[in-house]
Image (cartoon, coloured by chain):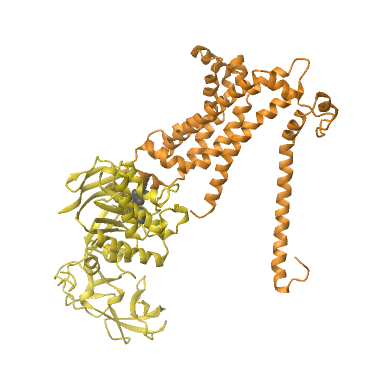
Chain colours: A orange, B yellow
């Protein structure tokens, strides 16, 4: 805009520039936050492309001709089991997520939709787990898994993670389901749908954005967990990526290039899953923004 | 032949009784409207007919078959909800075809019925749209279309027009009326709106606190309300009520009026008198039956509502011609048309009129 704008627009222009200023402020804060949040990730990825000397000599520098090296990736990919660990992590995460979302949504639907005795009590019981860390029960869980002969199976991890993720999923989903219109479910009843089909064909599509939200923040702790894989499934065949990385961390020496390379690779599936779910998140946000 | 019969139907939520024994017969092809104040149980009664609320007592029969334990989908009903309740992830065609697809109906049959309904409601150009791309009126039309496609024996409407703006409401009201003329299907319609009730209904059911107060044609309810509640509920602006008594000669007077020539049984209980704003004539102060001071004159152009102070807690409303000159502060005389007066006893029951109104057979 130029200085010689006609006088009647000056007022609105001042308003606009004030708004631009506020927007710039907001973006500055957001950019700062993004920088802080991304910094460690960038550091990991950057250093994974350096050799050992490069990592220690100039940890903050970009890889250059002298320090660039793929030795970390070579070690990781050359180590035959890494693909297996990777697959294990994926299986455990996806299966647990599936169970959390399915069972959580079903429980939430029952709590929100049906009036029955002890409904509230049952709801509280189901979400009590939010306040009690599941790791407190590690010993009991281990005993249980031993008794069930599930030690060193991926199933043991899937079961534990499902239990860990369910309380918060039930909590969020049932709160949301209470806000769903009763009419649309009644309409489906008049249309002749069974209660199961109402759940799958009417309720689930309506709560897709919330399912995506729950999926995103249930996923990260599962993918990153070291505790339960170490205790329940530390055999070579069932190791997850986080556990697999540990083999590069020796008591006296740490193969940093390999550690960083495996971590960099481990970020990829999380990014991919996040990309899938966040499309849903944004679709949900914008469809709610337009008057329904 | 009656299409729908309710016998001593009751409903309680936990310990709270909401419907206290309702008896009603709806004839085949009839348009019945439920009206009543908020919370009186209109929706609950409709949902019980639909099978969406279990029945606590009594019996509901649709076409000779008791349906107490029959699922909503098998009752031969279709329901249109206030919030439209369209499936947001399906397009208009998908919404209308949904029930039939579930019933495993033949594709060609579904297509024919959806197109037929779309044709009736002028929805053809919208068939590929999602509900969020439709206006409120269009959405409600889709909801009605979805009901038509199911070809029900009874249509149930729960305040279908109350989310629409005034102009659209008038238009959709006419459309629903034409739909009824065309399909000749039994319809049960819940509304708050007096005008909807009066214009749509073959018969109106007035409910209060889970009981039926009166059932009748719109004009029966207007001219011959059976009790004070119905008299006050039907008609807008509402009926004026005045305390009444007998004078020495046995004539009825109201709020200090001149004696009125009313056919009241000697010795019967007379406590209150009701007259609608449109049945009062204006005259000079001191003439007519009553005289009072104009508090407010609401001029709507074609007509004027005068609020007249008669010394009662509530002002007396007169509906007069738009050209009357009375101002607030002036005294006016009121002439009550005796044939339009309603007399109520101590329990709020109306004394029967000497003769039926000419418009009611
Ligand atoms: N699920 C329920 N649990 C408990 N009480 C209920 C329930 N549904 C309705 N009620 C009560 O039943 C009564 C009748 O409700 P209903 O919805 O039928 O009223 P309505 O006549 O349709 O009112 P409105 O005109 O406001 O829609 C109300 O007092 C309401 O509080
Ligand atoms: Mg209602």
Q: Is residue B9 left or right of residue A207?
A: left
Q: Position of residue B109 (x, y in %)?
A: 29, 48
Q: Position of residue B281 (x, y in %)?
A: 29, 81
Q: Position of residue B250 (x, y in %)?
A: 17, 75
Q: Which residue does the image show at 36% across and 57% down from the upper left?
A: B160
Q: Is residue B40 visible?
A: no
Disc tally is: 0
- Res A224 quadrant in image: top right
Q: Is residue B260 visible?
A: yes
Q: Nearer the viewer, residue B254 or A146?
A: A146
- Res A235 quadrant in image: top right
Q: Which residue does the image show at 78% across and 15% down from the upper left?
A: A252
Q: Is residue B237 above or below residue A143?
A: below
Considering the image in quadrants, where does the C terminus of chain B appear?
bottom left
Q: Nearer the viewer, residue B76 or B23?
A: B76
Q: Which residue does the image show at 38% across and 38% down from the upper left?
A: A197
Q: Position of residue B207 (x, y in %)?
A: 28, 56
Considering the image in quadrants, where does the N terminus of chain B appear?
bottom left
Q: Is residue B140 left or right of residue A6?
A: left
């Amino acid at each position: 805009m130029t200085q010689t704008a006609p006088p009647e627009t000056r007022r609105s222009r001042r308003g606009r520039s004030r708004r631009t200023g506020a927007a710039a402020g907001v973006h500055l804060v957001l950019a700062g936050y993004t920088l802080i949040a991304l910094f460690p990730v960038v550091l990991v990825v950057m250093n994974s492309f350096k050799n050992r000397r490069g990592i220690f000599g100039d940890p903050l520098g970009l890889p250059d001709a002298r320090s660039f090296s793929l030795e970390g990736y070579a070690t990781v990919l050359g180590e035959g089991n890494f693909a297996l660990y990777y697959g294990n992590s994926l299986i455990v995460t996806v299966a647990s997520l599936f169970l959390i979302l399915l069972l959580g949504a079903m429980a939430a639907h029952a709590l929100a939709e049906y009036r029955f005795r002890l409904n509230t009590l049952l709801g509280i019981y189901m979400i009590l787990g939010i306040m009690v860390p599941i790791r407190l029960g590690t010993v009991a869980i281990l005993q249980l898994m031993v008794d069930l002969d599930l030690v060193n199976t991926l199933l043991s991890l899937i079961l534990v993670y499902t239990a860990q993720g369910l309380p918060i999923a039930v909590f969020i989903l049932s709160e949301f389901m209470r806000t769903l219109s009763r009419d649309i479910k009644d309409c489906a009843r008049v249309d002749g749908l069974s209660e199961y089909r109402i759940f799958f064909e009417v309720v689930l599509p309506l709560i897709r954005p919330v399912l995506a939200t729950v999926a995103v923040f249930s996923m990260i702790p599962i993918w990153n967990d070291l505790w339960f894989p170490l205790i329940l499934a530390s055999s070579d065949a069932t190791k997850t990526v986080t556990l697999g990385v540990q083999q590069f961390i020796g008591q006296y020496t740490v193969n940093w290039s390999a550690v960083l390379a495996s971590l960099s690779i481990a970020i990829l599936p999380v990014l991919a899953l996040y990309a899938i779910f966040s499309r849903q998140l944004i679709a949900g946000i914008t469809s709610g923004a337009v008057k329904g | 032949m009656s299409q729908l019969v309710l016998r001593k139907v009751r409903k309680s939520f936990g310990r709270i009784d909401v419907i206290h024994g309702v008896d009603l017969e709806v004839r085949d092809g009839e348009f019945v409207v439920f009206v009543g104040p908020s919370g009186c149980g209109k929706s609950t009664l409709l949902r019980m007919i639909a099978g969406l609320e279990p029945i606590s007592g009594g019996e509901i029969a649709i076409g000779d078959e008791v349906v107490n334990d029959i699922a909503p989908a098998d009752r031969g009903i279709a329901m249109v909800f206030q919030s439209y309740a369209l499936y947001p992830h399906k397009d208009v065609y998908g919404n209308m075809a949904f029930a039939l697809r579930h019933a495993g109906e033949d594709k060609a049959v579904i297509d024919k019925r959806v197109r037929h309904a779309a044709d009736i409601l002028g929805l053809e150009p919208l068939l590929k749209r999602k509900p969020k791309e439709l206006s409120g009126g269009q959405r409600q039309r889709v909801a009605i279309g979805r009901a038509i496609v199911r070809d029900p024996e009874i249509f149930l409407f729960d305040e279908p027009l109350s989310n629409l703006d005034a102009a659209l409401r008038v238009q959709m009201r006419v459309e629903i009326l034409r739909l009824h003329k065309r399909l000749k299907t039994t319809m049960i319609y819940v509304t708050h709106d007096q005008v909807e009730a009066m214009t749509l209904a073959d018969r109106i059911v007035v409910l209060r606190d889970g009981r039926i107060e009166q059932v009748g044609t719109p004009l029966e309810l207007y001219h011959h309300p059976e009790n004070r509640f119905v008299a006050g509920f039907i008609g807008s602006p509402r009926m004026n009520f005045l305390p009444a008594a007998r004078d020495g000669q046995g004539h009825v007077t109201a709020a200090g009026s001149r004696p009125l020539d009313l056919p009241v049984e000697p010795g019967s209980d007379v406590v209150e008198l009701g007259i609608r704003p449109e049945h009062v004539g204006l005259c000079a102060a001191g003439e007519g039956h009553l005289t009072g001071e104009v508090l407010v004159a609401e001029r709507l152009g074609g007509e004027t509502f005068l609020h007249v102070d008669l010394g009662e807690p509530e002002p007396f409303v007169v509906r007069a011609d738009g050209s009357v000159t009375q101002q607030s502060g002036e005294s006016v005389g009121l002439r009550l048309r005796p044939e339009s007066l309603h007399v109520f006893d101590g329990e709020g029951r109306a004394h029967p009129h000497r003769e039926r109104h000419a418009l009611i057979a």
